[in-house]
Amino acid sequence: MALLDVQDLTVTFQRKGQRPFTAVDKVSFSVEPGQTVGLVGESGCGKSVTSLAIMRLLAERGNSVTGSVEFEGTDLLRLSDREMRNRRGRDLGMVFQDPLSSLNPVIPIGLQVAEVLERHRDMSRKQARDEATELLQRVGIPDPKRRLDEYPHQLSGGMRQRALIAIALACRPRLLIADEPTTALDVTIQAQILAVLSDLVRDTGTALIMITHDLGVVAGLCDEVNVLYGGRIVERAERHELFAAPRHPYTHGLLQSIPRLDAPRGDKLNPIKGSVADNIPWDHGCAFAPRCPNALDVCREVSPALEPEGQHLLRCHNPVEPAVAAGEGKR
């Protein structure tokens, strides 16, 4: 049974004097306990807005959110602000993309971890401080007792990210959303952060939503992958199936643009032409059509539906042939 079930989630931003902009367009997916689900795509595809909508952290004005986000059978979008505040931290945790702007710069790290424990687990200040020490140690921060009294600017980028993870894990949430948790970190620290998240899922059964543009992160962590483009899911598949034979031209292009150690010397990359701004509205056709090497006339006239295609769910009129996708995926 799904722990989180998102159905037709749509987020539209509105500004006075401007046309409404739909950042997330009828996105549906589910997450089971102990499962890691990836949301993948370039910047501007709607990944982070999806997570903020799930957590009810979007600004109250200037946007509209429709659809349903059911957590253990309760629609989070229908909860009052007070009920949602009680859910955040206790049942739902989130690791934000930029730890320096997410942590309070004038409050010691220890207090920022402890206040979550006091708020949701009714601990005393001393109990919360002792638990905060254990949490910092658990996420791999050296000399945790000393770090409790330090401020965010005194920590490295990797330690700040670990502190954010410690805050998110403090109340042992059943669902954790990690929004680009390894951005701007060197590869060694990236591996350590991903190991912490992987251990969390394995040891506690926490469900994890991993938001990233790094397909290497997806390959090593996720069970199921949702590829987003223009605010919609264009392909969904189990991790191994997706990497072995990507069917959507966008997914195929993302994989083709990554350097490979087993590629012949001097082999050129094949980047996707254009940018996410080069699109057409989904109600007029396929948003990826202006950049797609497989585009047909129908792609600019009819919006494709998300339909089963082998082991995938696929939104495409002219997908990559299985033999081609499988051959290049194994290269």
Image (spheres, rainbow, N blue to C red):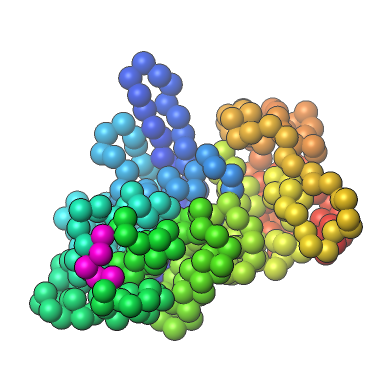
Residue 2: tell me if it is visible: no
Q: Quadrant of residue 203?
A: bottom left
**Residue at left 68%, top 32%?**
274
Residue 328: tell me if it is visible: yes
Residue 300 in the image, given as x and y percentages of width and height: 70, 28
Q: Looking at the image, which is closer to me, 322 or 261?
A: 261
Where, quadrant-wise, is the C terminus in this rendering? Answer: bottom right
Where, quadrant-wise, is the N terminus in this rendering? Answer: bottom left
Residue 280 in the image, given as x and y percentages of width and height: 62, 28
**Residue at left 56%, top 67%?**
188
Q: Is residue 14 above or below residue 100?
A: above
Q: Looking at the image, which is closer to me, 327 or 283?
A: 327
Q: Which residues are magenta?
A: 147-151
**Residue at left 44%, top 63%?**
158
**Residue at left 64%, top 52%?**
235
Residue 161 in the image, given as x and y percentages of width and height: 40, 62
Q: Is residue 41 above or below residue 288?
A: below
Q: Main secondary structure of the magenta part?
A: loop
- Return the residue found at the far top: 17
Question: Tag count in the figure?
Answer: 0
